[in-house]
Image: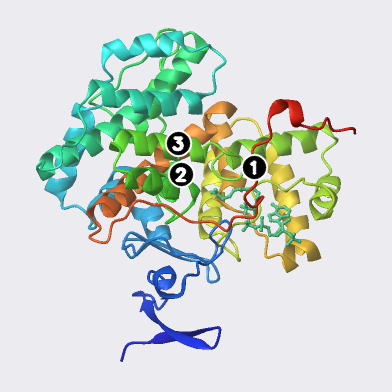
Amino acid sequence: MEQTAKLIIDGKTYELPIIEGTEGERAIDISALRRDTGLITMDPGYPNTGSCESSITFMDGERGILRYRGIPVAQLAEHSSFRETSYLLINGELPTPDELNHFSVMLNDHSLVHEDMQHFFQNFPRRAHPMGILSSMVNAVRVFYPEIPEDTSQEAINITFSRLLSKVRTMAAMSYKYSKGHQVVYPSHRLSYCANFLNMMFDSPVKPYEIDEDMVRALNVFWILHADHEQNCSTSAVRLVGSARVNLYAAISAGICALWGKFHGGANQAVVEMLQDIQDGGGDPAPFIARARDRNDPFRLMGFGHRVYKTYDPRARIIKQVCDTVLSKLTYSDPLLDIAMQLEEVALKDPYFIDHHLYPNLDFYSGIILRAMGIPLNMFTVMFAIGRLPGWISQWKESVEDPHWKVHRPRQIYQGKTERDYVPMGERVTKVS
Ligand code: ACO
């Protein structure tokens, strides 16, 4: 029997269908609400609003669950590669050996960036933020390569996805080399997706980069953990911009811009900056916790809290383990890690953090891993963007294939002035402050 919810407005009862997902999540379908009642719903920031039905990622913030296409992220982090996880997200199933091999060949074939695009890189100021460069360059890729035609073959679609996945990685490394004023390192067919990135970042004519398999593994896990997170801010940006039927590159570029913000992907950079501030202030995290608790202070503890997780972020547990492996390779100890661990310990016992269900999120430890890999601070959010790319692509693909597709266009409740007449300039009274 179809479940419904009853809504009574001005004494009249409306029955609204209830939609149930495969994991038992339920939503009241209000798609006919305005037509039937003249009312809309109000949900600033959308914490109570479902924007789509999706079969890509399941997360349960209360129980700390995250699965891609049904597979727990911890299993993928342990057994899979970023390349294979990308295939899973985009295509819905794990690849066979032949499919994975074909995918690798496509990633390799499309990894070079058009030589003419180098002029763009050369003309960005050296101090330009790599996220700004990346979002512009992804848009620029559209100019060099055609967008996906409406009636295209699956192979042509796959080429576009592979092109994005491999070129974004190449362009990210290029932007770093340009920022240093160093010669660009090209991708190599001999290296895997992650090893290639590290090599393009750190190989140099005067100091050849030696591939360290532990670092490659850590990068795989880092990117697997970032690969998708259902309808977060940047993914919603990709879906919203994509709903106007712009080309895929423009939609992904919008996602990169949304990710840049410090309350989203920019948090990994903000965490390290905060840990550095704590260290510069003598290493005691207590004043920072006190500021975070103070309602009159806008300061927030970076890397804590999450819109959906009201328990420990499952990704934070995994990344913390990888952090230990990566740091054990270093010949020096990172004082910021000790500060991070102290901060976590104090915050987890603090009544404010307990009452507000504030736990460390993925970004809390990811900055420390990236530092240990030698990734510069301003590239941290770019690292997140490369990892989130398969998620954005699969969510975009799902949204354009959705038979119930609509241009995203929320409404509002107007609270401004009611109608009034235009006052000619000479009749306006000067305000006295
Ligand atoms: N430090 C201190 N207080 C916090 C924090 C924090 N990090 N996060 C939330 N709160 C408090 C708020 O002040 C608010 O308190 P109040 O109810 O007493 O006024 C309450 O918790 C709820 O805060 P909201 O902003 O409504 O929660 P929301 O779910 O919208 O916020 C967010 C989620 C933006 C991630 C928030 O926790 C935050 O700003 N965290 C720091 C930035 C960060 O780490 N971002 C990374 C997000 S994860 C990711 O993108 C991979």
Q: Is residue 145 in view?
A: yes
Q: Position of residue 335 (x, y in %)?
A: 72, 36
For mark 2, what is the residue? 222
The residue type indicated by label 2 comes to Phe
Report the quarter where the C terminus lies: top right
- Label 1 packing within 10 angstroms: few (<14), some (14-19), many (20+): few
For mark 3, what is the residue? 256
Q: What residue is drawn where x is 33% and y is 23%? A: 140
Q: Looking at the image, do the residues carrying marks 2 and 1 touch, with CB atoms under 8 Å apart?
A: no
* Residue 56 sits in quarter: bottom left
Q: From the viewer's side, name the closer residue of 29 and 353.
A: 29
The residue type indicated by label 1 comes to Asp
**Upstream in sequence: badge 3 or badge 2:** 2
Which secondary structure lies at badge 1? loop
- Is 431 on the left-hand or right-hand side of 210? right
Label 3 or label 2, whichever lies nearer to me, is 3
For mark 1, what is the residue? 421
Rendered position, 35 above or below 300: below
- Is 35 on the left-hand or right-hand side of 247? right
Q: Looking at the image, do the residues carrying marks 3 and 2 touch, with CB atoms under 8 Å apart?
A: no
- Label 3 packing within 10 angstroms: few (<14), some (14-19), many (20+): many
- Is 314 on the left-hand or right-hand side of 332? left
The residue type indicated by label 3 comes to Ile
**Upstream in sequence: badge 1 or badge 3:** 3
Q: Position of residue 268 (x, y in %)?
A: 59, 40
Which secondary structure lies at badge 3? helix
How far apart marks 3 and 2 lie (CA) works out to 18 Å
Q: What residue is drawn where x is 61% and y is 40%? A: 262
